[in-house]
Image (cartoon, grey):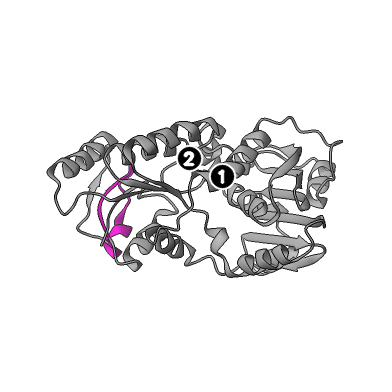
Amino acid sequence: MKNFALTGLAGYIAPRHLKAIRDTGNRLVAAVDPHDSVGIIDHYFPQAGFFTQYERFERHLEKLRRRNTEEQVDVVSICSPNNLHDSHIRTALRTGADALCEKPLVLNPWNLDMLEEIEQEHETNIYTVLQSRLHPSLLKVREELRQSSKDKKHEVDLSYITSRGLWYHFSWKGDIQKSGGITTNIGIHFFDMLIWLFGPASECNVHLHNDLRAGGYLELENARVRWYLSIDHEDLPEEALENDQRTFRSLTIDGEELEFSGGFTDLHTRVYDETLKGNGFRISHARPSIELVHDIRHTQPDQNQGDLHPLTRDAITKNKKTRAY
């Protein structure tokens, strides 16, 4: 049984990590969050230590390490805001624990180089959560693609609309310096998925990028990809609105729709299981998508470069609003 600590306990994604720690037969000994609305922990680990001050949490981990007790932390699960990931990973390594960090691992690619050096210095490991790579439907598609002609360029359209309320813009997620913007905050796992399926990017065009939506074109090793991301409910298709759905995912490959809207519920548990077996996703797995979203974030939109996604064209034509205030 492994001992876990967790940062970002009050956040949206933390319950999936709590469930994964429990379901893999491990335990949580300490957690931290500046917000104290963390009653969810009673469903999983009511005896875990809880801190609202990060320096006290860090000191607690160090105390457990020096005492070499049965509660010494083996793994720190990091669910904190994106801009804090780098710092919290370093805390884990300095206290002798491995780090299992939500995506994006970091916001800027150059931070990965330092983390690799620190990882070697402390002889610890940095893992990340790339759960789409364990989705059964996507694993099947990847195997089919690997068996198909290597010379074929697939035509791919990706659409992801996940409506967010006004709160989003006032939280850290609405601050591009903290979240990386929507291409990083909601798009990182889709870009990782595309690179995993179709190979590295050789061309990146951005057609639209603001605080509500983004769209562009990618030339990957084995695919031409038009992509569109949005957090505006007005972009949801009629069928989603009629069914009171606030999220819409669509991935078409050569005109055929790939159904992968379900099956995500227990993927974090699978990530934990594989990580604890020594098969976790490392910095090398995360680097290509982090480099890509960094390039997207710093590319000036140009509608004359590359093929526009239909929803991008529609948003530009209708001059849709950029912020829902």
At horizontal 77% and vertical 53% (from top left) the residue drawn is 223
Seen from this angle, which residue lies furthest right? 304
* Quadrant of image for the N terminus: bottom left
Whether residue 273 sits left or right of residue 202 in the image: it is left
Badge 2 vs badge 1, beta-carbon distance below 8 Å: yes
Whether residue 77 sits left or right of residue 82 in the image: it is left
Q: Which residue is mark 1?
A: 185
Whether residue 203 sits left or right of residue 61 in the image: it is right
Residue 85 in view of the camera: yes
Whether residue 274 sits left or right of residue 322 in the image: it is left
Label for residue 267?
A: none
At horizontal 29% and vertical 65% (from top left) the residue drawn is 43
Badge 2 marks a residue whose secondary structure is helix
| Label 1: how many Cα within 10 Å (few below 14, some 14–19, many 20+) | many
Q: Number of numbered discs present?
A: 2
* Quadrant of image for the C terminus: top right
| 269 falls in the magenta region | no
Which quarter of the picture shows residue 136? bottom right
Instruction: List x then y, in percent, for residue 233.
Output: 66, 53
Dot 2 or dot 1: first in sequence order is 2
Instruction: List x then y, in percent, for residue 185.
Output: 56, 44
| 38 falls in the magenta region | yes
Badge 1 marks a residue whose secondary structure is helix
C-alpha span from label 2 to label 1: 8 Å
Identify which amino acid the numbered label 2 is placed on.
Asn
Which quarter of the picture shows residue 273? bottom left
Q: Which residues are magenta?
A: 27-44
Above or below, 153 against 315 in this view is: below
Q: Which residue is mark 2?
A: 82
Q: Nearer the viewer, residue 59 or 271?
A: 271
| Label 2: how many Cα within 10 Å (few below 14, some 14–19, many 20+) | many
Q: Nearer the viewer, residue 261 or 4?
A: 4
